[in-house]
Image (cartoon, rainbow, N blue to C red):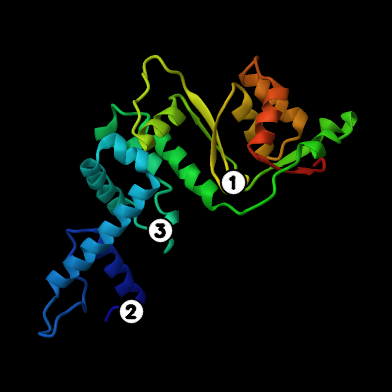
Amino acid sequence: MQRPPELQEEFAEALLQPGNPVPAGVVGPNGKAAEKRFAVYRNNVAVSLTAALKSIFPAISALVGEEYFAALAREFIRRHPPSSSILADYGRDFGDFLDAFPPLANYPYLGDAARLERAWLDAYHAADATPLDAGELGSVPQERLGSTRIDLHPSARIVRSRWPVATIVEANRSGGAMPNLSAAGGEDVLVSRPALDVIVTRLAPGEAAFLAALGAGEALESAIASAFDGAASFDLASCLQRCLSTGAFLRLLPPA
């Protein structure tokens, strides 16, 4: 006799694998396997997970079309079953799945577009917190500024792409025209939610590296060096102004 954990595992796997037989114990009044009833339940699960993915990735759905997205979602669901009962947490691997899905090889920007949409939702659901005030940063003595660390806001997310990913997502969420991918360059993007609304900000060269370094706990001086390593045109004053105005910073931290 199967133990309850084994039965649960078999039941969950059968829900997401259409080729699997009806799990043991799922029977009708006649004692026979309830194939039709289980098929209805299996379909309801697939429909609800597909709807969740579509609500998280509306730009991807618009890009590939609703019918293709539904088929794509079912394949993702089969390979990546939910690990949480919270539907908003589902689909964290969707960008990687799109990158590796052979039929989409001619659409290499889809993975980054999905990562940006995932970042948007994560920022939306992040903990509320009051962003760092510009005056507090300005009050740090010059001799201590380089060793100061800055904690990023809980909602802050960075997405880096060799494609104009913010432009792609905005166009497909609003029904606008796709950018010319052969002419457009990549975009580094900051996603934040300092108050009620999520803000999507295109970053200048070096700013994504700067924020990533701060997020890793590096001091301001080290983060500036990281920014200049990747972009000689990095402008610290403009970067700080952009980060403060979008609520990317949470608080100042003492030197490590």
Q: Secondary structure at mark 3?
A: helix
The residue positioned 78% from the left and 44% from the top of the image is 253
Residue 96: percent from left, percent from top: 39, 40
The residue positioned 81% from the left and 30% from the top of the image is 146
Q: CA distance from mark 1 to mark 2?
A: 42 Å
Question: Callout 2: 10 Å neighbours few (<14), some, many (20+)?
Answer: few
Residue 251: percent from left, percent from top: 75, 44
Residue located beneath label 3 in the image: 87
Q: Secondary structure at mark 2?
A: loop
Residue located beneath label 1 in the image: 155
* Amino acid type indicated by mark 3: Leu
The residue positioned 35% from the left and 29% from the top of the image is 176
Q: CA distance from mark 2 to mark 3?
A: 28 Å
Residue located beneath label 2 in the image: 3
Residue 5: percent from left, percent from top: 36, 74
> Is 179 in front, or is 113?
179
